[in-house]
Image: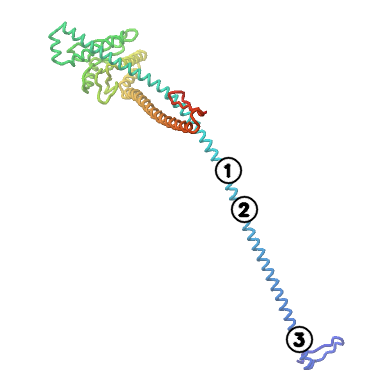
Amino acid sequence: MADFIIHCPKCNHAFEPGDSIREEVQNELRGQMKEWQKQKEIETAALIEAEKKKMHADLENNLKKNIAAEYEAQLQQFQKNATEAETKLQAARAKEIEFLQKEQGLKTKEAELELTLQRKLIEERGKLQEQLAKEEAEKIGLKEQEYALRTKELEKQIEDQKKLVEEMRRKQEQGSMQLQGEVQELMLEELLQTTFPIDKIEEVGKGVRGADCIQVVRNQFGNESGKIIYESKRTKDFANEWIEKLKSDMRTLGADVAIIVTQTLPKDMDRFGEKDGVYICTFTEVRSVALLLRNALLKIAEAKKSQENKGDKMVMLYDYLISSEFSEQWKAIREGFMSMKLSIQKERDTMEKLWKAREKQLEKVLLNAAHIKGSVEGIAGADAVNLSITGADEDDTLLLD
């Protein structure tokens, strides 16, 4: 311990400590060292405790901040959901109002439709009555024409009996079909002559090859505008060879239009029309068909005269008259008429069913009203209650005083 020197703090005298001093100093130093270590341990413990508290406070603050942030986020989400729910509720209310408005509009339209339907029903009923009256008049006209045909047959029979008894016997042996055909031919010639007095109606003699009747169409100045040939048939069945035969006659005679007047139409036709270049109609339709075709020939002749160098147009017009398009247009007119008639009948049947259902409902209401009347009179007495129930045949009223 030679190196351990102690200096006096007052005189600065240096000396080496002895063993006792050294031991005392060492003990004192050890004590100070222990106190210092103890103090350091206390300070370290305090620092650790302070650091723990600080860490705990920081952790608590962070946790509070996280919880506050999460709460704020949830609160904002709840507010957003509430806003969306309010928006959806307002939209639902708007839709409900719109639905109620539409429902009211539908009720109004239904009432208007009912009123329109009633008006239309009344109108269609009037049209139907007019149509029935027209059909009845047509039936009467058909009966009159049939009567006229029979009268002509009798007149023809009487005339033939007066002229040639033997000829009449031969015709009777051949059957009455030929006689009926001759009568129709005579009526056809008379009808054409009466309808078209300025035209020339020529009868083709018996035994001469060709049509039964030729109509030379003339305009208002007496100029020839074309020819129409007629073949009269009064049989139970229609033969398709008549068409080819009449087309051959049309070429031979130089006619423009050929018409077959038949009692029985082909199986694929229910009214007049065109088939393979030949017009086919019944006796009741021949006046209208002849008028239509005659006007067409007059227009063709007039166009040919005014445009002599444009014969192609006349050919085109003629081709149109004998084309399927012209025939289909006539068929469309007939089909439209039949469709309208069926539609009116269908509407009539529908409305009659509706009226019947409402009549049953009215009877049910009146029956229940009568039960109420009996119950009220049984409770209050017949004199105390004035209940008047009338049905659809009276004033249609229900009063309870």
Q: Is residue 42 left or right of residue 388?
A: right
Q: Which of pointers 1 and 2 lies earlier in the amino acid sequence?
A: 2
The residue that disc 3 covers is: 29
Give the CA distance from mark 2 to mark 3.
68 Å
Residues packed near mark 3 inside 10 Å, few (<14), some (14 to 19) or many (20 plus): few
Label 2, residues with CA under 10 Å away: few <14, some 14-19, many ≥20: few
SS for tag 3?
Answer: helix
CA gap between label 1 and label 2 equals: 21 Å
* Res 208 → quadrant: top left
What separation in Å lies between label 1 and label 3 (alpha carbons)?
88 Å
Up/down of 224 relative to 12, above or below: above
Q: Amino acid at mark 3?
A: Leu
- The mark found on residue 76 in the picture is 2
Q: Secondary structure at mark 2?
A: helix
Q: Residue at x 69, y 71 (%)?
A: 51
> Which numbered tag is attached to residue 167?
none
Where is the N terminus found, in terms of image quarters?
Answer: bottom right
Where is mark 1, residue-wise? 90
Residue 355 is left or right of residue 149, and the answer is right
Tell me the kind of residue under disc 1: Gln
